[in-house]
Image (cartoon, grey):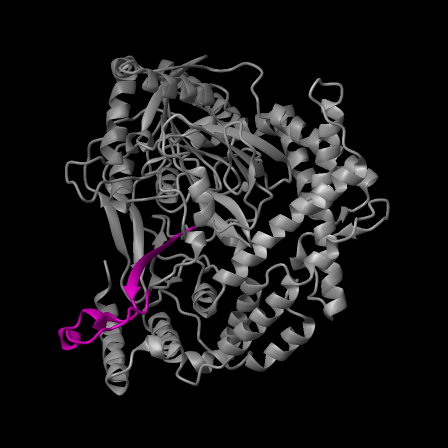
Amino acid sequence: MMSKKFIPVVLVLTAASLFVAFQTQGRTDSDNPKSKYTRIIRNVGMLLEQGHYSPKTIDDSFSRLVLAKFIEDLDGDRNIFLKSDIDGFKKFETKIDDEIHGAELVSFFAISDQYMKRLKETASLYNDILAKPFEFTVDETVMLDREKLNPPKNEAERKDIWRKRLKYLTLDKYNTALEDREKNKGKADFKFKADSTLEREARDAVRKQIDRYFSTKITRENNDDNFSTFINSITGTMDPHTNYFAPVDKRTFDEGMKGSFYGIGAQLKEDDGKIKISSLISGGPAWKGGELKVEDEIIKVAQGNEEPVDVTGYAVSDAVKIIRGAKKGTEVRLTVRRMDGSVNVIAIIRDEIKLDDTFAKSAIINGDHKVGYIYLPEFYIDFADPNGAKCSEDVANEIEKLKAENVEGIIMDLRGNGGGSLPEVVKMVGLFIEDGPVCVVKGREDKPYQWKDKDKSVLYTGPLTVLVDELSASASEIFAAAIQDYKRGIIIGSTSTFGKGTVQRSISLNPEAENPLFSNRNVEDLGSVKLTLQKFYRINGGATQLKGVQPDIVIPDRMEYLKFREKDNTAALPWDEIEKASYKPWTSTISNDVVIKYSDEKIAKNETFNKIKESIGWLETYSDKAYSLNLRKYKEEQDQFKAKIKELDNLYKLNKEMTVKNIAADTVVINSSKEKIDKNSQWLKRVSNDIYIDETVKVMNSMIAQSATAKRD
């Protein structure tokens, strides 16, 4: 809910817009983009200063950060702007704050114009570079992570940066072609091609790829698009989750697969000209297949056995059209590059994305003890239908079914759960505790408000573990934190959850658009800002912001070295704490501390997890180095890399799968169609071979054994 103290901000926006509107009567902002941009930047500044939960002072220091972020967002690879450009932009270091406060908007137009000029210059380089064969016997390297390097000093240095980048792309394709030739020689239909031919074909493929890349950038990155980037540099400097959304022509990275019809069940984003997976829809074909991962880069798309289309440089909307299908059951093959650099071809059968695939589901894991397992992909609720799905009710139903099966403990799996409905979190925590506070929400000037479970009844009183990872965020963190603070269960997972402890609300930048005074006037929409208004706190007083929830038992995680948590963003709001809420910890015969200590000692000695930690460290070092452009050395690096990836993949496979079965009460529904039978089989297979669930079961076994001993005593 919006704080009453924030309402005047909306009124100020309206009044300011009315004044400007009357001053420009008879003209529209589309006639004068500078006027529209001026209104947008001023209104954004007003919202940030008057409404943001914890606003940074918009002064010269803030201006410097915005300038640096804008330049970085335009040219993250530092291969378009020259050093002289960056030096020239320094005159705006202390000007952007003045522009936000009403001074003439100059910085954006100067930087955007220079960017477009340099972009066109850069786009003219690659044809000359790719016109001649590359020499792959020379000893030279390329640093692909340009953030570690300075901008080019001059045009010659910039051209050499692009030469090395294009040479690397060609080397990658050339090496693959050589490997394919070696694999296929001797086959009946094999057609031998000379090295020179393969090298030329590799250059041609790279030329087409870069053609699309620059064509897309030059067409898309006009003033409106760059201005959205500029405004998001301002909002993103305030905090990572405050964002500006333009009213027209939203940037194509916001487009993606919605799963409304037939598709693979993935959402896409654009990242520096690359098409990447931003998320997987739980229960969708890609999710069930288990091969496609978040942050995978899509390189090629093929319709079944047809020739793949290289989509590098495509706009996301264009790639979506190729990946989506008109028919259920058709195959699409994606060639993807993982964040670790490995390349894989993944075949996925298109299907209709159904909402019921995202609901809570449970199973029984039989081993030393009978353990219940509940998977919850998100804290969902159907706001449009009072009788619609609610995760708290669904989880309660799963618990009842597990209790009927006489399980001795329950695992709640919240890995990859990005959050959802706060009221549902409160109700869900209430299933495991007596009445009491679950979390605290605080606005900018409001008193802390406690969200409480008011139901004294407890649905489940037995041993409980909660499994989380780096992608468990927001509502997931509230649930895990409450269970941890009440000492109701043991939290297990990577070193910390994501760390998003803030609440946003979308605010229009021109409320006068709906004002009756303007019923006869065409008021152009200025867009909106998703503004951070509140912060979450645990009942122990600490924020979930930045630090997230640190599990009681930490298991080495493959994604640990990838820096994408909240704490890895320099603009993130800080951690803080408020007064501790009054609550009564759970009383149990199980000593969580004893179980945690025992499990930590076992994990520390676990050969598989130690090898995973070692491999993760190796990958971090590998991804942080310069790459050879010498074919022989490149092959050696690739062989070493592939061997390490294969080793890591094998480490993630259990030597002996767990025995996982459905709840008896679910069998009728599961067996109602072949489709449901197949989906269920795939899900059980994934659960049974999951090393993290396996380790959580071992923790649960310790809890159950300790509880049984206490009862005998």
Q: Is residue 502 magenta?
A: yes
Place residue 604 in its image quadrant: top right
Residue lying at the far right in this picture: please name it: 138
Q: Nearer the viewer, residue 271 or 177?
A: 177
- Look at the picture and state if 491 lies above or below 209: above
Q: Is residue 622 magenta?
A: no
Report the residue at 78% width, 52% height from top: 132
Q: Is residue 50 left or right of residue 634?
A: left
Quadrant occupied by the C terminus: top left
The residue range painted magenta reads 500-527
Q: Nearer the viewer, residue 433 or 529?
A: 529
Q: Is residue 160 visible?
A: yes
Quadrant occupied by the N terminus: bottom left
Place residue 161 in its image quadrant: bottom right
Report the residue at 57% width, 31% height from top: 345
- Look at the picture and state if 273 lies above or below 553: below
Q: Is residue 11 left or right of residue 153?
A: left
**Residue 52 x %, y %:** 35, 67
**Residue 188 x %, y %:** 71, 17
**Residue 291 x %, y %:** 52, 30
Q: Nearer the viewer, residue 312 or 487?
A: 312
Report the residue at 22% width, 32% height from top: 393
- Look at the picture and state if 393 lies above or below 544: above
Q: Is residue 651 left or right of residue 47?
A: right
Q: Nearer the viewer, residue 598 or 357?
A: 357
- Look at the picture and state if 137 lies above or below 165: above
Report the residue at 62% width, 23% height from top: 650
